[in-house]
Image (tube, rainbow, N blue to C red):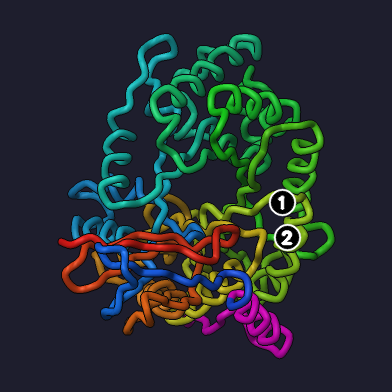
Amino acid sequence: MGAIAAEVFDGVDDAAGRAVMEQARQRIERMRKGDLRLRVLGPDGDPFAGVVAVRLRRHAFLFGAAVTDTFQVKPGGKATPAARAAGLAVVAELFNVATVNCHWSSNQPARDGPFSWAASDALMSWVKAHGLQPRMHCLVYMNEGCAPRWREQVRTEAEWWPLIERRIQAVAERYGGDYLEYDVLNETNFLGAWNREHNAGFPTYDAPETGVRIFQIARKYLPHARLLILDQFIPTSKPGNPGFDKYFAYCRQLIAAGAPVDAIGYQAHFYTGRPTFAAGTEQAGPDAFRMKELERGLDRLATLGKPIHITEFNPPSRNNKVKNPNQARLTDEAVAAWSVNFHTLAFSKPYIEEVTRWFVVDDLGGRGSDAGLVTLDGRKKPEYFALKKLLQETWSTQWQGQANAGQIALRGFYGEYELTAPGFKPMIFTLSRNGPRESMLRLEPL
């Protein structure tokens, strides 16, 4: 029997879903844009009367991608050098944030030895060179590949706490002023049982008191940083959605206990064990991949009272950990349409501040066989072109014309702007939700 045909499904297939998306587009126009009156002066201080152009350079909202696995592609691996080049170019072109993996396993090769920063330094240099804001993943992540390789040498919880503190202190001393935000703890609930079995002696990974203490240590050494908790699940309103219910309760306990959690992280990995994505998942329910249901789940998550950061997004994809050759998959065009709908829903929610994807290249960095913007041989996929249009055309602001007695009235997306005029240096200004509604720029000759 051959493989099943790819499915055409964009997450919006009924009147209720279409209404959700129309309301999302209307909210974007209201809440992601603002009005600004610019007063443009010439070098002499008089109102400028020439032609000027204004363009959005960088959204205030965080649109990003994880860069580590693409950056570290080597010849002879499953991804080609062409995929690496195309993937890095896509990150630099489309996004304003890049996730940098800075795992304990690579930073501290020996329990009592020195720290090694070569790999994360190289990533940080690339990110900064391309004008991206780096976010850090992850201070404490006790899975097989990211936990310290010497962990079996540590027998008791009492031995672990000074090691945890030393790890966080070392990261803070190296990068405290560099990262936009820090994933403090990752997959405490998803890997809770695994850690109890494989990391004997480590503080109980999914216990709220463990999380509170680790967050308090992070705040001690990173007093001004934005600190996130992070886990994976599909948020729906279905009663008995175990992954979501457990994480929701855990976050509520952390917050109630005073843990300095600045934002709730959500991984947003979308896989299904059912024959089609339209059929949802067993745990999250039959509407798990429909925007109308994801809206209900995200709204529930927001009742925790913290901003939501979607930090590991991937659209519906086959799961490379599942050996069924006929598992559900979407057409590339359907993936693109679904992704646009998800980004639109997320961008429309006032409590969501970030959508950062995990896969840049297919099958690279996790379970997502079809989850990248670029194929393993370096071809850009329909989702890339769809997001490029969304981020750089639909959600962009550009204006060109004659300044009226030095005055320009502008309505645009919140973010960083550039104003140019022939013969003068580019001028940078910001339009922000809580910023001034009038601004003055004085042009300088080239």
Picture layout, residue 371 above or below residue 197: below
Q: Nearer the viewer, residue 376 or 101?
A: 101
What residue type is disc 1 on? Gly
Quick one: SS at disc 2? loop
Amino acid type at image mark 2 = Gln
* Alpha carbons under labels 2 and 1: distance apart: 8 Å
In terms of image quadrants, where is residue 101? top left
Q: Residue at x 56, y 40 (%)?
A: 226
Callout 1: SS: helix
Name the residue at 52% across, 59% down.
355
Q: Nearer the viewer, residue 34 or 367?
A: 34
Q: Is residue 34 above or below residue 126?
A: below
Number of other residues with Cα within 10 Å of mark 1, as a class: few under 14, some 14 to 19, many 20 or more: some
What residue appears at the point 68 percent right and 24 percent down from the top-left corner? 213
| Front residue (pair 105, 138) | 138
Residue sitting farthest toward the bottom: 15
The image shows residue 376 at horizontal and vertical percentages of 29, 62
Which region shows up in magenta?
1-28
Q: Quadrant of residue 122?
A: top left
- Label 2 sits on residue: 283
Q: Which residue is mark 1?
A: 243
